[in-house]
Image (cartoon, helix red, strand yellow):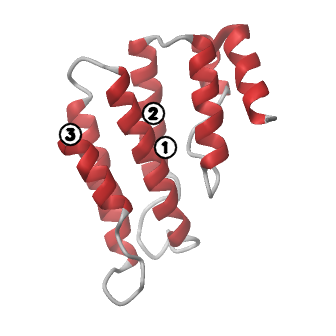
Amino acid sequence: MRIRGLVREVGRIPVDGDRWELHDLVEAGREMLAELEILAVGPVTVEFVDVVEDAIGVWDGLAGYLGGAWEVLDTEGGEIGESFAALHLRLCDELQPDPVELGRRLAELVEAAHSDSCLDAPDVYADLLGDEGLDAYESALHH
């Protein structure tokens, strides 16, 4: 529950320019990721993967505000997003979810992304998805 609250809190960061700097958004993303990585050491559950997927959506929203400011913030454009993607893939690999369900979930994440999704779906998930999961992914994207 604590980590779900953290993800919600980060998602509510007001980006009005008066109170928050772009650096604050990057730090919020990094802190959220660090908390998730610490918790990922424990047993993987579907509920935890749900939280990570929520965090990916929150990061996507924050990253949209950053635009081309990455160079100014002295970080590479996709570093945080790539870390979220790697965490998600690792958790899915440990959990071994139903391939059809995973395909649908990945499609939802990719479609919900406002900027380019940090997830390399379905390519890096191909072994987990198999033919059925890939079909479900493609089908969900086109509906």
In the depicted structure, whether residue 29 falls above or below residue 138:
below
Q: Which is closer to the viewer, label 1 or label 3?
A: 3
Q: Is residue 25 above or below residue 49?
A: below
Write down the residue under mark 3: 1
Pick out the residue farthest to the bottom: 18
Q: Residues within 10 Å of mark 2 (few under 14, many from 20)?
A: some
Amino acid beneath label 1: Glu
- Identify the mark nearer the N-term, 1 or 3: 3
One can see residue 79 in this view? no
Asked whether the residues under the numbered discs 1 and 2 touch, taking CB atoms below 8 Å apart as contact, a structural biologist would say yes
Residue picked out by circle 1: 82
The residues tagged by marks 2 and 3 sit, at their Cα atoms, a distance apart of 23 Å
Secondary structure, mark 1, is helix
- Mark 3 closeness class: few <14, some 14–19, many ≥20 residues within 10 Å: few
Q: In which quadrant of the rendered view does residue 103 lie? A: top right
In the rendered image, the vertical position of residue 127 relative to residue 112, given as above or below: above
Left or right of 15, for residue 69: right
